[in-house]
Amino acid sequence: MSLLSRVARPVTRRIDRRIERRVDRTLRRELARHHHTTELLLGSDGRRFDRHPTPAQISAVAREVGAVTGERFARRATVQAYRTLIEVENRGVGRIAGGTSNILGKLAATPLLKPPNGDVLEIGTLYGLFAGCLARQMLRAGIPYHLTIVDPIAPVQLQEGMEITHDASGTPISEEIVRANLHYAGVQPDRTRLLRGYSTDPGIHQALAGGKFGVIVVDGDHSAPGVRADLEWVEELAAPGAVVVVDDYDDRVWPGVKEATDEHLARGDTRLTRIGQVTTTAFLRAS
């Protein structure tokens, strides 16, 4: 090795180390910027409404969806449901209530359970965003939808033992916002019927008498008496083979949902049987 090479080698190593440090700092800054932007879009880590599912969470939801539906490609359906969730929630205002895994389970499993028709009844809608997601998921499965929503659309959410006067999203609840969110999600107005009122209102029951819905989402009054009343109504409205989605089942925050559902399923005269559970959603089938 020449003298010039021996002298130049330490200088070259120092230059290389400086370049590496600069590249490393640049990469760290870019990664931090990317992480910050992602948090702005999908929520902050550790929050209840965080939209950053881990690979393990996606895999867990996909396994449960596959077990309930028998679908071989449940992971693909779960990932697609995640894309729908993020697009619709970010296009709209307000939020979809619940954790990401629970929402993905409902969106992925419901169409895979092959409901007998696309007539969807949602009891409890909040901002209308989940209804928009579900309508899109039904279409992806080749099931044309007709959406009926029953909700008082009240500025104050009343649940057993609590009164929620300010939503976590900071957005007020109104019919205008619900209709706007359905529009942002691509739901066609002529395929939507919004009935303002409680699911126990006689006028609401009269308006839907004789209906045979292929999908019914029970997500209204979370108290045990409220869920009992809704399941009684479901018995009248479910088409043969209908998929009944009971939200917040086995959620420790809402013990009345599981209590009332289990009691109803234990009856000898019910048309409903349990298909299975994905995260905190129970899926039932009407005979």
Image: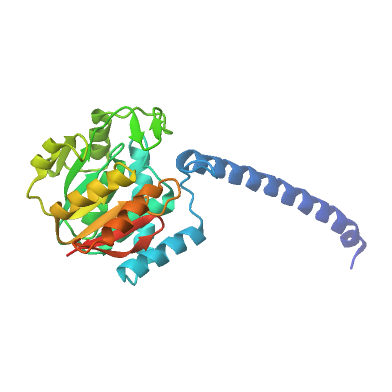
Please state the horizontal and vertical placement of residue 160, each as a whole percent of the image. Answer: 37, 38
Q: Residue furthest front?
A: 268
Q: Residue furthest left?
A: 210
Q: Which residue occupies 24% across, 33% down?
A: 152
| Quadrant of image for the N terminus | bottom right
Which residue is nearer to you in this view: 246 or 117?
246
In the rendered structure, the answer to whether residue 200 lies left or right of residue 38 reads left
Q: How is the rendered protein coloured?
A: rainbow
Which residue is nearer to you in this view: 189 or 197?
197
Q: Which residue occupies 31% across, 29% down?
A: 173
| The quarter of the displayed image where residue 26 is located | top right
Please determine whether, in this image, residue 283 is positioned above or below residue 120.
below
Q: Which residue occupies 51% across, 61% down?
A: 56
Q: Is residue 93 visible?
A: no
Count the marks: how many? Answer: 0
Please determine whether, in this image, residue 2 is positioned above or below residue 23.
below
Q: Residue furthest right?
A: 3
Q: Which residue occupies 35% across, 55% down?
A: 281
Please state the horizontal and vertical placement of residue 187, each as a whole percent of the image. Answer: 21, 43
Please determine whether, in this image, residue 275 is positioned above or below residue 133.
below
| Quadrant of image for the C terminus | bottom left
Q: Is residue 56 visible?
A: yes
In the rendered structure, the answer to whether residue 169 lies left or right of residue 205 reads right
Please state the horizontal and vertical placement of residue 200, each as a whole percent of the image. Answer: 20, 40
Which residue is nearer to you in this view: 75 or 228?
228
